[in-house]
Image (cartoon, rainbow, N blue to C red):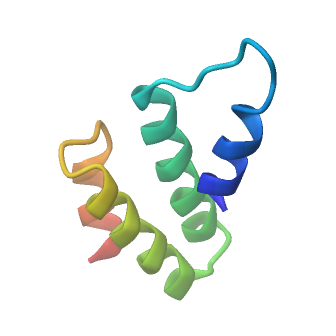
Amino acid sequence: DPDGYARFLETIPGYKLDNFAKDSLNFKAAESQYENGNFERAVTNYSEYIRKFPNGQYRLQAHQHRG
C-alpha cells in the first residue's frame, strides 16, 4: 500500500515526501504488481495512480499498462 508507506515515512522526524516522490511511489507499486503477473491488482493500482496523479510523470505508461 503506497499510501500507508508514505504515511509511515512522514512519521520519521525531518523526512518529507514531495509530490514527485509520491507520484513515483504510487506508480512503482502498480508496476511491481504488473511485473509479478498480478494483472488485476496492477490494473486497480494503475487506475488509482491515474486518479491521484492525472498529470503524473508516468501517466502514459500507466494508461498503456492498464489497457
Residue at the location (56% across, 43% down)? 25
Q: Quadrant of residue 32?
A: bottom right
Q: Report the residue at 42% width, 40% height from top.
A: 23
Identified at 70% across, 18% down, the residue is 15
Provide residue 54's location: percent of width, then percent of height. Answer: 20, 52
Residue 5 in the image: state x and y as whole percent.
71, 48
Q: In this view, does 37 lie to the left or right of 50?
A: right
Q: Name the residue furthest top.
A: 14
- The answer to which image quadrant residue 58 occupies is top left
- Residue 20 as seen in the image, left or right of residue 36: left
- Say whether residue 53 is left or right of residue 46: left
Viewer-proximal residue among 63 and 26: 26
Residue that extends furthest to the right in the rendered view of this protein: 12
Q: Residue furthest bottom?
A: 40
Front one among 36 and 56: 56
Who's the residue at 56% across and 26% down the image? 17
Image quarter hosting the N terminus? bottom right
Number of marks in the rendered image: 0
Of 46 and 10, nearer the camera is: 10
- Compared to residue 50, the image places residue 28 above or below, namely above
Residue 36 image-quadrant placement:
bottom right
Whole-percent x and y of residue 38? 62, 81
Q: Quadrant of the C terminus?
A: bottom left
In the image: residue 49, left or right of residue 21: left
